[in-house]
Image: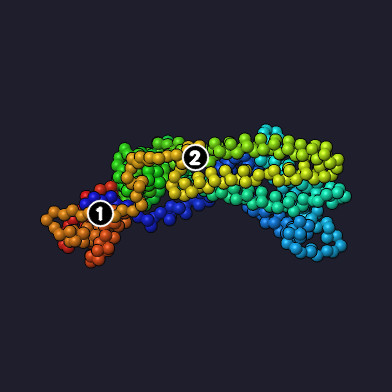
Amino acid sequence: MQRHHEHHGHQQPQQEYVGHDEHQKQLADVRQDLHQARQQHSHHDKHAGHRPEIFKRRFFICLVLSLPVLYYAPMLQMWFGYRAIAFPGSEWVAPILGTIIYFYGGWVFLRGAWRELHSKIGMMTLIALAITVAFIYSLAVSFGLRGEPFYWELVTLVDIMLLGHWIEMASVQGASRALENLAELVPTVAHRLVNGRVEDVQVNTLQHDDLILVRPGEQIPIDGEVTEGASSVNEAFLTGESRPVTKHINDEVVAGSVNGDGALTVKVTRTGEQTTLSQIMRLVEEAQSSKSRYQALADQLAYWLTLIAITVATLTFIVWLAFAPDSTFAINRAVTVLVIACPHALGLAIPLVIVNATAMSAKHGILVRSREAFERARNIQTIAFDKTGTLTEGRFGVQRIYTDQIDELKALRIAATLESLSEHPLAQAIVQEADRRQIQFTKGEDFQAIPGSGVEGTVEQSTLSSR
């Protein structure tokens, strides 16, 4: 009967609350690094300095301000068959609110377009061009130019773009929490051994060849090599295998794994960015900062679409001016082309799909190293797994019971009695199987856990061992 003893869960919460402020500082540093990485990966990096909360606030403020503009829009009055309430100065409701929305809600797009003009024009330039032309033309109409203003088109375009960018930034932030979850796997305090004494120190102060003590149930704070003791260690976060791994002297342990029932003395072998967990975090960060093939295609399409929109609008103005010598009518048609040529779906659809797919993968334990490879994964037809543990539910269970000169139910009752005092996953699986079969058993006596080996105890006046 195989036995690897599990960690004692009651000691872990104490470890989590030690150095809480330092832990929060480390998480803040991770968020800052993620923020800088996100500034590099998307064609929306022109607004990457903003958080989702800023887009959310601007969207709702602009949405509220847009309602009066929509209410007084002549086109909507004709469509829905109502007459807006008139009062002295009501004709200035749309111009005033449209101006506020243009500068407050559209400022992020204007600034993004200005930055694009110094590198390569793209979606921000097209958006800024559309709302600027609509705003200037509508304002000119309000001050006497003959034509129909585009205030309601202006405010709805700004609202939709703010909504889309809010969703995108929120999705990017959600995907980035995968790194924060990884960072939380590492405790902030380690028990360093100095001249036979134990002192609590910050993990980031540990140096190569330092000796640290890892008590039962604690998370291993740094990569190292076992120099004393034996225990079982849960490395499921790294390998996907839910079964704890027995560690003896000279065995390697990695930061973030959970120690089992035995105390370990570990010599530090890797620190800082050299640790296994830091390397995993780096791979995740690189995946989030990388640009996929479809995003590069969207950038290229946005570039050409901007040039085409400007060209077609210019031709529209020239043609209408040639066939109908009315500059106002020609300007109206050219402005219309620029306003409707803003394909916000092109700029949002691909990043949203990629980011959400990456976030869903991270949520299910899949860390994407390359987004381009992630896109090609749709063509995969065969998958070969080298570990059966990665294909399970992560929970142990009893499949079969083999006995020798003893009844199966009696063997299960004895095993459940001996293992009922253990917290190890294998022990719990045996106890659950006995409960499922409604087998009555009591607790064993003289229970003793042998770190890394098994348990001993007295069952029905007989001393038994599961080693």
Q: Secondary structure at mark 2?
A: helix
Count residues near mark 1 (Cα–Cα under 10 Å), then give few for <14, some for 14-19, many for 20+. few
Q: Amino acid at mark 1?
A: Gln
Query: Which residue matches tag 1?
Result: 399
| Front residue (pair 231, 381) | 381
Residue lying farthest to the front in this orientation: 323
* Residue appearing at x 63%, y 37% in the figure: 301
Residue lying farthest to the left in this orientation: 405
* Tags 2 and 1 touching, CB below 8 Å: no
Measured from the top left, where is residue 4 in percent x and y? Answer: 28, 50
* Residue appearing at x 66%, y 49% in the figure: 161
The quarter of the picture where residue 45 lies is top right
Q: Quote the CA–CA distance across marks 2 and 1.
A: 39 Å
| Front residue (pair 33, 365) | 365
- The dot on residue 91 is none
Residue lying farthest to the top in this orientation: 119
| Whether residue 54 can be seen here | no
* Residue appearing at x 40%, y 48% in the figure: 219
* Residue appearing at x 79%, y 63% in the figure: 84
Q: Amino acid at mark 2?
A: Glu
Measured from the top left, where is residue 314 in percent x and y? Answer: 77, 37
Count residues near mark 2 (Cα–Cα under 10 Å), then give few for <14, some for 14-19, many for 20+. some
Is 425 on the left or on the right of 238, as rendered? left
Give the mark nearer the N terminus: 2 vs 1.
2
Measured from the top left, where is residue 92 in percent x and y? Answer: 83, 56
Is 305 on the left or on the right of 438, as rendered? right
Depth-wise, is mark 2 or mark 1 nearer the camera? 2
Is 331 on the left or on the right of 370, as rendered? right
The quarter of the picture where residue 66 lies is bottom right
- The dot on residue 375 is 2
Colouring of the image: rainbow
Q: Secondary structure at mark 1?
A: loop
